[in-house]
Image: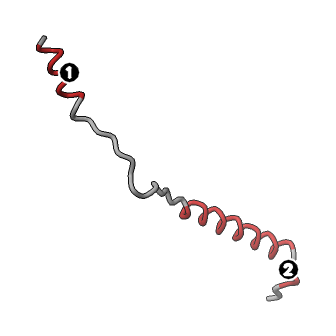
């Protein structure tokens, strides 16, 4: 009977409430880094493949 009472007492203490604001996960940093690296590689390939664009 004591275990049943303890279970009943603990069961009444748990409350689950939805947050007021939606959860936001920001992953912009990783995406921006990938874009910058890709653009840098594309620019380097363009310069190497077309040396007449930037004469020295």
Coordinates of residue 25 in the picture (x, y in percent): 49, 56
At x 87% / y 77%, what residue is drawn?
50
Q: Is residue 36 above or below residue 22?
A: below
**Across the whole image, how many numbered discs are drawn on residues?**
2
Q: Nearer the viewer, residue 47 or 23?
A: 23
Quarter-of-image position of residue 17 = top left
Q: Is residue 55 left or right of residue 38?
A: right
Q: Nearer the viewer, residue 18 or 38?
A: 18
Give the residue at mark 2.
51
Question: How far apart in space, not on screen, are marks 1 and 2 (Cα)?
Answer: 78 Å
Give the residue at mark 1.
7
At x 24% / y 28%, what residue is drawn?
11
Check the image and name the residue furthest to the top. 1
Mark 1 vs 2, N-terminal side: 1
Coordinates of residue 56 in the picture (x, y in percent): 79, 88
At x 26% / y 35%, what residue is drawn?
14
Q: Quadrant of the N terminus?
A: top left
Badge 2 crowding class, 10 Å Cα cut-off, few under 14, some 14 to 19, many 20 or more, is few
């Amino acid at each position: 009977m004591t275990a049943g009472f303890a279970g009943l007492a603990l069961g009444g203490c748990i409350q689950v409430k939805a947050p007021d604001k939606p959860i936001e996960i920001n992953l912009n940093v990783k995406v921006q880094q990938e874009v910058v690296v890709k653009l840098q590689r594309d620019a380097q390939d363009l310069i190497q493949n077309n040396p007449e664009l930037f004469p020295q």
